[in-house]
Amino acid sequence: MIHYLKRNQLDIQKYDACVQSAINSRIYAYSWYLDSVADNWDALILNDYEAVMPLPWRQKYFIKYIYPPAWTQQLGVFSAIKTSEDLVLKFIKAIPRKFKKVTIQFNSENKFQHKNLTERVNYILSLNKPYEEIYKGFNKNRKRVLKKTLKLNSIVDEEISSEEFLDFYLNTQKNYQLGQDQITIIKNLLNSNNERVCIWGIRESKKLIAGLVWLKEINRITYLLPIATIKAKEKGLPTLLISTLIGQYQNKDLVLDFEGSMIEGVAEFYKSFGRTKEKYIVVKMSFFY
C-alpha cells in the first residue's frame, strides 16, 4: 500500500536506507539533500519503505504545488528492485490532490507512458575502464584542448572551502543572474558539511579562476556546479577538472553524470568526452477542479 507522509512523519533512517539501496539511487533523493534544496518536502511510501517517492513542494497564494528544486535533475520512484510501469503509475495516482500543480522529473530508470509526459536528455560516462580507454572516447577537439592545458602545469586543489567557492561563484562574470532562491540553495548545499559534497578548484596567483562542486555517492558521481572565468575557459581548465575526476575514479563501478544538458553548447561539451545519452521523463499535471 502506498501512503503519504509529511517530512516530520518519516522514519528518516528507513527512508535514506531505501534511497541508498535503490538500483536507481540518486543523490538528489536523500533527506539531507532535499532538506538543503527544497522549500518543503514530503514523500509517498510503499509499505514499510520498500519504495519511496519524494515530493518537494512549495506554496504560493495559498496554492500548494510540487516542483523540481534547483539542482535536482532526477527524482521519482526509488526501489531496491526494478520499478515497473504499473508501480510508477500507482505512485503518480497516489499524489495528494491538495497539490494543485505537479511537475516531477523522474529518474531515467522510471519507464512509463503518461499523457502529460515529455522527455529530456542527460549524458553519462561509465568509469569502469582504465583512463587510457576512456580517453580514446574523447573527440579530437577535447584531446587537443587537454594536451594544451596539461602544458600549463595547473594544479587542481581538492580542498576548496565552501566560503571561497561561493565568493568566487557569485562574483565571476556569467551570462545569467541567479535568483535569491538559487543562491540560498547553493549556500545550503555548500554549508551542509556532508562528505559527499566535494569542492575542487584551480588557482592563478593564489586566486580561484575555475571551480567545481561535484557529488559522490555509491555508484554515481554528479557534475553539479562548474564555474570558470573567461580566461580559465580559454585555457581549457574545465576540461582539466573533468579529466582529473575521471583519472581519480577510473576502473571503478561508477558513472559520471554530467546533469544534462538541453542547451546545445553545453551538450556538445559533454558529448566530447565520449558520453552515453540517457533519457528521463518529466510529468506535468494540474488538479484545479
Image (spheres, rainbow, N blue to C red):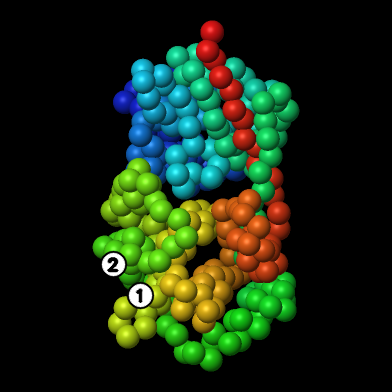
- The quadrant of the image that shows the C terminus is top right
Residue 188 vs 250, above or below: the answer is above
Q: Residue at x 59, y 65 (%)?
A: 252
Q: Is residue 188 left or right of residue 79?
A: left
| Residue that mark 1 sits on | 208
Q: Label 1, secondary structure: give it.
A: strand
Q: Is residue 206 left or right of residue 30?
A: left
Label 1 CA crowd tier, 10 Å (few <14, some 14–19, many 20+)? many
Are the residues flagged by discs 2 and 1 in contact, CB closer than 8 Å? Answer: yes
Q: Residue at x 51, y 56 (%)?
A: 222
Residue 17 vs 262, above or below: the answer is above
Residue 63 screen position, x and y as percent? 41, 19
Viewer-nearest residue: 52 or 94:
94
- Residue reaching furthest left? 163
Label 2 CA crowd tier, 10 Å (few <14, some 14–19, many 20+)? some
Q: Amino acid at mark 2?
A: Glu
Q: Is residue 184 left or right of residue 249?
A: left
The image's mark for residue 164 is 2
> Is residue 94 shown to the viewer in this render?
no
- Residue reaching furthest top? 289
Going from N to C along the chain, the mark reached first, 2 or 1, is 2
Q: Label 2, secondary structure: give it.
A: helix
Q: Residue at x 41, y 21 (%)?
A: 64
Viewer-nearest residue: 251 or 285:
285
The image's mark for residue 132 is none
Residue 98 vs 45, above or below: the answer is above
> Is residue 186 shown to the viewer in this render?
yes
Examine the image and state in which quarter residue 93 appears: top right
Q: Is residue 218 left or right of residue 59?
A: right
- The quadrant of the image that shows the N terminus is top right
Residue 148 screen position, x and y as percent? 58, 87
